[in-house]
Image: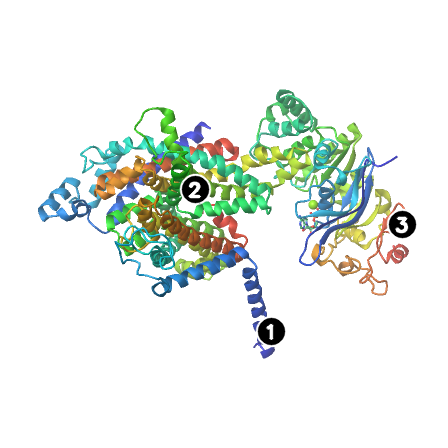
Amino acid sequence: MSAAFELRGLTAAVPGEKRAIRLVEDVSLSVHAGETLAVVGESGSGKTVTFTSSLGLLPKPGRVIAGEALLEGVDLLKLRPEELRRTRGARIGMVFQDPLTGLNPVFRVSEQITEVLRAHLPISRSAARDRAVELLTRVQIPEAARRVDDYPHQFSGGMRQRVLTAMAIALGPRVLIADEPTTALDVTVQAQMLDLLGDLRDADGMAMVLITHDLGVVARQADRVAVMYAGRIVETGTVAEVFAAPRHPYTISLFRSIPDIEAPTGTRLTPIAGSPPDPARRPEGCAFAPRCFAVSDAAGCRSVRPLLAGVGHAASCHRQSMLETTA
Amino acid sequence: MVFYIARCAGQFAVALVGIVTVAFFLMRAIPGDPALYMLGDFATPEALATLRARLGLDLPVWQQYGIFLARALQGDLGMSVVTGEPALAEILASVPSSASLAVAGMAIAIAVGVPLGVIAAVRQGSVVDVAVMLIALLGISFPVFWVGITAILLLSHALGLFPALGATSEPGFWKGLHHLALPALVLGLSVAAYIARLTRSAMLEVLGQDHIRVARAMGVPEWRIVWKLALRNALVPVLAVIGVTFAWSLGNAILVEAVFSRPGLGSTILKAVLARDYQLLQAGVLVLAAAVVLLNTVLDLLYGAIDPRLRQQ
Amino acid sequence: MTTAIETIDAVAEAAARRRAAIRRYTRHPGFMIGAIGILLLVMVAVAAPWLAPHSPTRTDLMNTLARPSATFWLGTDQFGRCVASRLIHGAQVSLQVGFFVVLISLSAGTIIGAVAGYAGGWLERALVAVIDILLAFPSFLLALALVAARGNTLDSIILAVAIAYTPRVAAVMRSVVLTIRPRPFIEASRAIGLTPWTIVLRHVIPNALPPVIVVATVSAATAILAEAGLSFLGLGVQPPTPTWGNVIAEGQTAITTNPLISLSAGLCIAYTVVVLNLLGDGLRDTLDPQMRRNTGKLL
Ligand SMILES: Nc1ncnc2c1ncn2[C@@H]1O[C@H](COP(=O)(O)OP(=O)(O)O)[C@@H](O)[C@H]1O
Ligand SMILES: [Mg+2]
């Protein structure tokens, strides 16, 4: 079966002082209908840029300089602007990271949903409004018929996230990209949001990309996972494989940095020291080397860029074999 | 919304009292004696004393202020020394002519400035943007009276498109409009330059906001994003600019009226200055300031209509 | 104790920073054009007596409204005076007005605005209210009324324009101070017990200077336009003193015979305002990119 959405060697860059600064590099991933792919990594690792640039939404002067973004086999990056516009929102939807600023403050929610519907469908204003109420009901906004004419500031953060989700699924897209859908929300509503996304995926048979930095979310919701660091995918595989035997030191460090439900209470968390490198100043060799617990000059960590190696469960680390034997 | 309107109305009333108060103390703070100023070369000690008594200048300042405020709030701004008519009535009589110039000029300014600013922002960094910004820079740099003279030279004398006089005694709406066109164009384009510059920067800010990226991701056509979704957001700062430029454009209107020999507040105020008609000048200043406050109140109401967040609080 | 080497390093570093700053300016075309343009104008104004081919005020009724020629570059006006010489000398008035108005309105506006932004309590509220009300008075009209009351010598025109434009500077200054007030070093100064006046003079004003410098260049342009307007209405420095506004007004009566008189005077004003605005925009971009926010909307 072919993938609903697939990236092949996607590389996006912005012009720099001397040469182009690559924000994401050679990213390949795929997600099938009815499946959830989780993309994880610390903030700044390039998760958002990967998907905005694949939709042609990277702000100028940013640009995709290589790769393909295939939606059901069609490369979005080769479409003419008008074709791309018709595809966006209709066949692939994206819910962005920050629900508080994602809605237009000076338009009613009904007007904003109507705007999306009428961008793709020849329907009347009143029909669009009825549809907006249905959509809000579908994302479980209480009293949708009454709230539909409210302004964004009259909704809580969680409710705004639901409105944005309603807009993203309004035209029944085949692929839904949800960028950190729970990060800005209260813990109590995070679970509800995730359940809602899961239900929507199952009901429509969508392919879903779930961007997150919460490994707990990955474990509960995703089928497969791609771990990103410094603009590259460093490890990918099924959730079961990666959770059972992480191969990249970065993934291992991520696991060590979260509280483990099964670990005996009192176990210390070890957050990863330092922060991801600025895209303009990525080290030679492995970008994770400066923060890596397994780094070794002999293995070429500081001089040779490691390749993603492995079939199915793959990782890009010079020290993989060493980690596997000691793990 | 009702609350919001009431609050705006209340602020308007307070501002009016403020204007009268500030005008009073400003006039008193200027070195120089109004009576001496009015009499000029005819100032004999007796004449001075009589005039000061008539103007109430021999009373303590606070008492003068009380009388002045009480009278002003009843619409009594004294008598024009030259004509003997009530100063306010004389000023108000010249308002319609100036108001039509100001309104026409503002309409042109908005109709030209806002779209140009939007286009420049959308095409940021392109030739179009540079050209629009260059023209706007020139627009704010040439003195408005010079633009008026040049326009008369080109469009009236050379091409004969418009009359050189900014007004006519002949009756008829179209006749009046024909004479109003050139002054309004000159006034409007100078203000349009400002509005274009500020619309551009407001639009650039809005176009970088998250909700615009969301609209793009949803496949909303670019022209609707720019002219509907973004522009309404940019309108609040743009209206704020219009409020600020209005006071400034009234100053320009005086000059435009002078260039086109058009009767109005400007010429009345100039007449007052030349005739040393202190009361008339004061009434003119107060009326124009009140017009600015009135416009700002209307704009406050509009902000509320545009941005629902401002209605609350 | 710092060692000699550390000192040398520090000096070298400071020099490098300075070089980087200078590069930022020289790479900004608008700033360069503005700076060079204004410098040229100052030189013309200073050297006017030597540059001008004729006396700007000597009339010659035998040679009125002459066409441009080698001796009278821009021809003569209806009194037979050399237009080019009048324009060259007119630069002196315009530049003086620009300079002194900025000096006065900036010092007054900065102090009032800084206090209005920093004081808090009733003083702040009262000052803000007065500034807001003053902003309702069209500045040009206010200047006109003040000139009318005080007479039209150069001094009183400068003072009138300065007073009329001070509220705007004060408003900008206050908005800038409001963004400085919450910064940590202000807290710290208060904590170590500095008096409010000391804090305003030593910390608030210096930190608010970059945007104020931008405002200064732009208000110089506004002041020059205002003076020209007053001159045009006959309320400026009195003829026969050459000012650009006077030349335009006098040229208007002869506009059909020699349009060059008014046109060239207008170009002089526009040139000055353009270079000042370019300089201001350039300073705004280079001094502090964040500043756009603080000053952009009020100008
Ligand atoms: N338009 C852009 N121009 C330049 N750099 C950018 C741009 N967008 C993102 N970046 C940089 O790219 C890196 C990746 O950002 P992002 O994809 O937002 O990370 P994540 O979503 O994983 O937190 C960050 O270092 C960010 O600063
Ligand atoms: Mg992100």
Which residue lies at the image location 86% right of the left edge and 36% below the top edge? A2
Residue A119 horizontal/vertical position (percent): 66, 29
Mark 1 to mark 3: distance in Å?
Answer: 51 Å
Distance from Cα at disc 2 to Cα at disc 3: 68 Å
What is the crowding at mark 1: few (fewer than 14 residues within 10 Å), some, or many (at least 20)? few
Q: Is mark 1 within 8 Å of ligand 1?
A: no
Q: Are marks 1 and 2 in contact (CB under 8 Å)?
A: no
In space, the residues marked 1 and 2 are separated at their CA atoms by: 53 Å
Residue C202 as seen in the image, left or right of residue C155: right
State the residue position of label 1: C9
User: Do the dots labelled 1 and 3 sit on one chain?
Assistant: no
Where residue A228 appears, as percent x and y from the top left, is 77, 49
Is residue B228 found left or right of C135 in the rendered image?
right
How many residues crowd mark 2 within 10 Å: few (<14), some (14–19), many (20+)? many
Q: Mark 2, mark 3: which one is toward the viewer?
A: 2
Pointer 3 indicates a residue of which chain?
A: A
Marks 1 and 2: which is nearer the front?
2
**Within the image, what quadrant is residue A287 found in?**
bottom right
- Which quarter of the rendered picture does the N terminus of chain C lie within? bottom right
Q: Name which residue lies at 74% across and 45% down.
A: A50
Could you tell whether A258 is left or right of C142 in the image? right
**Amino acid type for the residue under numbered disc 1:** Asp
Nearest the eye: A121 or C69: C69
Which label belongs to residue B190?
Answer: 2
On screen, residue A310 above or below C92: above
Amino acid type, mark 3:
Gly
Answer whether residue A143 is visible to the viewer in this image.
no
**Residue that numbered label 3 is attached to:** A310
Q: Secondary structure at mark 1?
A: helix
Chain of the residue under label 1: C
Identity, as a three-letter code, of the amino acid under mark 2: Ser
